[in-house]
Amino acid sequence: MRYSEDLTYNRVFLLLAVLWLAAALPRLGTRYSWDWDSSQFDRAVEKFDVRLHQPQPPGYPLWVLAMKGLTPLLGNPNSAQVLLSLLFTAVGLLFFTSLARELLGSEGGLAATALLAFSPLVFLYAIVPLATSVDLFSSCAVAWFAARIWSGEPHWIVPACLAAAITAGFRESGVTLVLPLLAAALVRGLWLSRTRSYAWKAFVAGVAAGLAARLCWLVPAARLNGGLGNWHDMANAQMLGTFRQTSALFGAPVVVHGKMLVEVLIYFAIALSVLIPLSLASRSGSGNPPAWWSPSFLGLWLTPNLIVVFLLHCGKPGYILLSLPPLILAAVRRRNVGRLALLGAAVGILVSCFPYERLGKSRPSTMGYLLLRSSPRFAYILEAGQRRMRSVLDAIPGSPSERLMISSVHRPEAPNIRTVTFDFRDLRWTDDPQVQLDANVRTVVVLCDRLQPSPVLLERFPNLRRVSDEASYSLWVAPVPVQPSR
C-alpha cells in the first residue's frame, strides 16, 4: 500500500512539473524586452560596453557571452535570455530538491520544491529575459555545496569554489550575498575534518581554482571596458548610486526608504503566498536533521539578503529570490505538509493569474501595479501588448521619417524610452516633451502609461486622441499641421 501511495504521490508532482514547463516553454518565443535592464542586455549582444550601460555594471560578462551564443540559434536576444532564465531556474530547483529531500524526506522534499517552483516570483523570473533568475540558482547551489562541506565532506571544496566563481560571471551580486555561508562552511569543515591535511589541501586548491576561474572572465571583460580599475570604479559607483536612491543610511529621504520597505513586504507576501495552506498542516516529529541544518546555517543563508533588501536597496521584486529557498525550507520543516503542497501550488497559480491591472492605473506607485509587477501574468501582458503596439504603429499613415515618437513612461518595465529605442528602433524616439519638430513631421505619437499624457503634451498637442489602451501603456496620436511655405 505504501509503495502505491508513493507512486501516486510522485506522479502527481511529475504532473505539476509538466504543468510548470507547459506554462514556461511558450515564453521562448519572446521578442520584446521585459524592462530597462533587459534592453541593456539586448544591446550588449551587439556591443558589449559597460561604460554605455550595455549592460549596466558590473557587466554580467558570462550572461552576455551566453546570449551571444544563443541569439543566432533562437533568432532574438530576448528569447536567448528567457532560455537562460529557465535553465538557471530549473537547475537551481534541482539543487533545492536535493537539499529538501535530505532535510524533509522524499515526500517533504518534493512538496517543498513544488511550493518554491510555483511561488509567483520564482516563476516570473524564470520566464522573463533578465539575469535575476541566477540569484535563485546561486542561493540553492551554494547552499547545497555549503551543506556538503559543513557536513564534513572536504572533497566538495574545489567544485564549490569553482561554481561560485563561474556563477559570479553571470550575476555577481547574488553569489556575493551567499558567500558568507560558504565561508562559514569552509571554516567549519576545516575545523571538524578528520583528515585535516587533506581538507587544507582541498581548501588551498579550491581558493586557487576559484580565483583562476574568476580571473578568466573578469580580466578579458575589464580589458574591453578600460581596465580592472575602471571596471571596479563603475561597479562601485553603480552600487553606491542605487543605495543613495533608496536607503536612508546613504542619504535617501526617510519617506523613500519607508516606501521601499512597504514594497519589499508586498513582494514577500506575493512570493510566499504558496505557504498559506501550511497553516492547516499538523506538526510532525522533529526527527534527526542533517548536520548542516542549524540556526547558524539558516541565518548565514538568509540574513545577508534580508539586510540588503530592507536596509539598502530593493528595486525589483526579484531581489528577494535569494531568501525564498531558506524561508520555504524553514516553513515546511516539522510540518506534515503532504498533499497540502498541491493546495499551496494552486494558491501560487491563483495569485500569479489574478488580474491586478484592474485594481488601478499602471503607475509604479499604485498598489495594483506593485502586485502586477510581481506576477507572472505581467510577463504575458507586456509581450502581447508590445506585439499589438507594433501592429498599431505600423498602421499609422506616413513613413517613419514623418512620425515623431515621444515616450512619456517613467517606470522600469517595458515599454519605456530605453526598451523602445531598441525594440522599435526603426522609429524616431525621444523622451523630451518640448522637442522641436522637424519640418517633415506629420504625426506625433505619444507613449504613456494608462493615464492621459502629461499637461505639457496636452497643451502642446490639444488634438491628441487615444488609439491604443493596454494594461501597461496607452498610445496617443496627433496630426501636425503642415506649415505654409514662406
Image: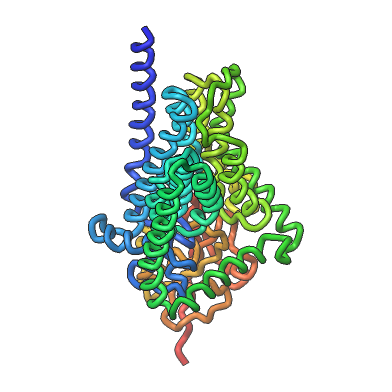
Give the residue furthest to the right.
254
Position of residue 184 relative to residue 11, above or below, is: below
Quadrant in which the N terminus appears: top left
**Is 196 or 94 nearer to us in this picture?**
196
Query: In the rendered image, is residue 254 in sight?
Result: yes
Give percent across and percent down for residue 370: 60, 47
Residue depicted at 28% across the width and 60% down the height: 71
Query: In the rendered image, is residue 170 in sight?
Result: no
Q: Is residue 69 left or right of residue 143?
A: left
**Is 69 or 259 nearer to us in this picture?**
69
Give percent across and percent down for residue 329: 53, 33
Give percent across and percent down for residue 67: 32, 60
Position of residue 260 relative to residue 408, above or below, is: above
**Is 405 or 221 nearer to us in this picture?**
221
Q: How does the figure colour the protein chain or chains?
A: rainbow
Residue depicted at 48% across the width and 62% down the height: 36
Residue 278 in which image quadrant: top right
